[in-house]
Image (cartoon, rainbow, N blue to C red):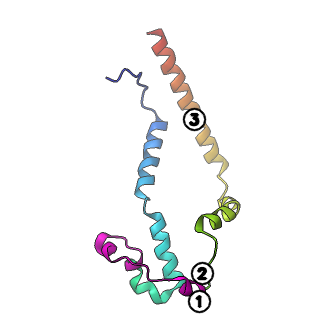
Amino acid sequence: MSGDKLEHFCLADLVAQANLISFHLSWNWNMDMAREAIRESHPDLADIVEELVPFSTEFLSTVVTSIDDEDLKQWGQYSEETLQERYNKARETIKRANAPLDPEIIQWQDSLRARRDLTSSVTTTTHEVL
């Protein structure tokens, strides 16, 4: 319909789709982490954490800033640095904290790439012959 040459569906396509679906299902992970961080660091706020960092639309209309700089200083959470600056400083630590991939997983990923490349070259060759 579009004039593009279509390639055969392969295992790599399936894995890519599964990863995309997984990514979208975890779209709210940062809010989940924020709620959990508040619960752990401030148990006195556990009862209202859903209102502070809403999961549903029930509390979205009532969201207001209820914690100011003085509160953060009192709790030892205040910083002149922005979150982005703090993240950038911690980036290498974050990378080192990631668990190394198992060699079998790396081998499996390489075999998937090789199959995809092989399938792609066969499809291209078939189209050229036709």
Magenta region, residue range: 51-73
Looking at the image, which residue is at 59% across and 68% down? 83
Q: Are marks 3 and 1 in contact (CB under 8 Å)?
A: no
Q: Distance between the Cα atoms at labels 3 and 1? A: 53 Å
Point out the frontmost of discs 3 and 2. 2
Tell me if mark 1 has few (under 14), some (14-19) or many (20+) residues whose alpha carbon lies within 10 angstroms of its own.
few
Q: Secondary structure at mark 2?
A: loop
- SS at badge 3: helix
Disc 3 marks a residue whose amino acid type is Arg
Residue 95 screen position, x and y as percent: 67, 58
Residue 80 vs 112, above or below: the answer is: below
| Magenta stretch encompasses residue 85 | no
Q: Is residue 90 left or right of residue 40?
A: right
Q: Amino acid at mark 2?
A: Gln
Give the residue at the far top of this rendering.
129
x then y, percent, for residue 91 = 67, 61
> Which label's residue is closer to the chain start, 3 or 2?
2
Q: Which mark is residue 113?
A: 3
Q: Secondary structure at mark 1?
A: helix
Q: Residues within 10 Å of mark 3 (few under 14, many from 20)?
A: some
- The residue singled out by tag 1 in the image is 74
What amino acid is found at the position of numbered circle 1 in the picture? Gln
Screen quadrant of the N terminus: top left
The quadrant of the picture occupied by the C terminus is top left
Q: Residues within 10 Å of mark 2 (few under 14, many from 20)?
A: few
Spatial separation of the CA atoms under disc 3 and disc 2: 45 Å
Residue at the spot of label 2: 77
Q: Dividing the picture into quarters, in which one does residue 85 lie?
A: bottom right
Q: Position of residue 96 (x, y in %)?
A: 70, 60
In the displayed structure, 45 sits above or below 86; it is below
- Which residue is situated farthest in the left direction here? 58
Q: Nearer the viewer, residue 21 or 1?
A: 1
